[in-house]
Image (cartoon, rainbow, N blue to C red):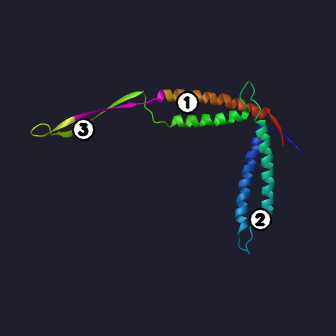
Amino acid sequence: MTERITLATALRRRKNLRGKLAALDARLVAANLYEEKNPPAFAFSVTLEERKATVEQLLKLDVAIDIANTKSLPNGGPVAALAIRQLAEMKSEIALISKLPSQPRDTRVEVTESRDWDHNVNPPRVVSVKKETVFKCEMPVPKQAEVIDRLKAQFEKLNAQLEAFNHETFIEV
């Protein structure tokens, strides 16, 4: 018997099935080797059959979700599968840019002063030596903030389209 559900419901169901699989796997590990006088709470063979049935449900659900994700998002958006990957890449790019070392401006000059012996004079004496280091920054803090804000806005727009798609698209499972 097939059931007609929204893609959003299917995604929640898939998450629950994955959690159930993890629990069944833990039961199998615990039930595989035990002391004879102390049997496990869940029988190995019964748990294994339940796991096989759960995997079958999950595979059917995954295929239905994959097929639905080949459709385009509303309002001329990209194909859902592409949108999902674009969202993941935007998250990665935001994380990358957020952790880049930066400074407030594109150029910063740092002057350090140290004392050293000048052996070119007689008698040698201690002199002050200044060293100037110029630091360049390709994406200073204001530019980082601008790029991150732009990416977040793009992410929110695309994510809203995908969420609407997930709640409006029905699949048969």
Question: Does residue 9 appear in this view?
Answer: no
Question: Mark 1 near mark 2, Cβ–Cβ under 8 Å?
Answer: no
Q: Mark 1 points at which residue?
A: 148
Question: Residue at coordinates 68% horizontally, 36% vertically from top-left?
Answer: 84
Q: Could you say where residue 116 lies in the image, as x and y percent from the top left?
A: 20, 40
Question: Residue at coordinates 69% horizontally, 33% vertically from top-left?
Answer: 83
Counting labels gives 3
Question: In the shown orientation, is residue 137 left or right of residue 145?
Answer: left
Q: Which of marks 1 and 2 is nearer the N terminus?
A: 2
Quarter of the image that includes the C terminus = top right
Q: What stretch is highlighted in magenta?
A: 129-142
Which type of secondary structure does the marked residue at label 1 adopt?
Answer: helix
Question: Does residue 89 appear in this view?
Answer: yes
Q: Residue 41 carries which label?
A: none
Question: Residue at coordinates 45% horizontally, 36% vertically from top-left?
Answer: 101
* Residue at far front of view: 120
The amino acid type of the residue labelled 2 equals Phe
- In the image, residue 12 lies in the stretch drawn in magenta: no
**CA separation, marks 1 and 3?**
40 Å
Q: Residues within 10 Å of mark 1 (few under 14, many from 20)?
A: many
Q: Name the one closer to the observer, 71 or 104.
A: 71
Q: Mark 2 points at which residue?
A: 44
Question: In the shown orientation, is residue 28 left or right of residue 149?
Answer: right
Which type of secondary structure does the marked residue at label 2 adopt?
Answer: helix
Q: Mark 3 points at which residue?
A: 114
Question: Residue at coordinates 70% horizontally, 63% vertically from top-left?
Answer: 29
The amino acid type of the residue labelled 3 equals Ser
Q: Which of marks 3 and 2 is nearer the N terminus?
A: 2
Q: Residues within 10 Å of mark 3 (few under 14, many from 20)?
A: few
**CA separation, marks 3 and 2?**
73 Å
Question: Mark 1 near mark 3, Cβ–Cβ under 8 Å?
Answer: no
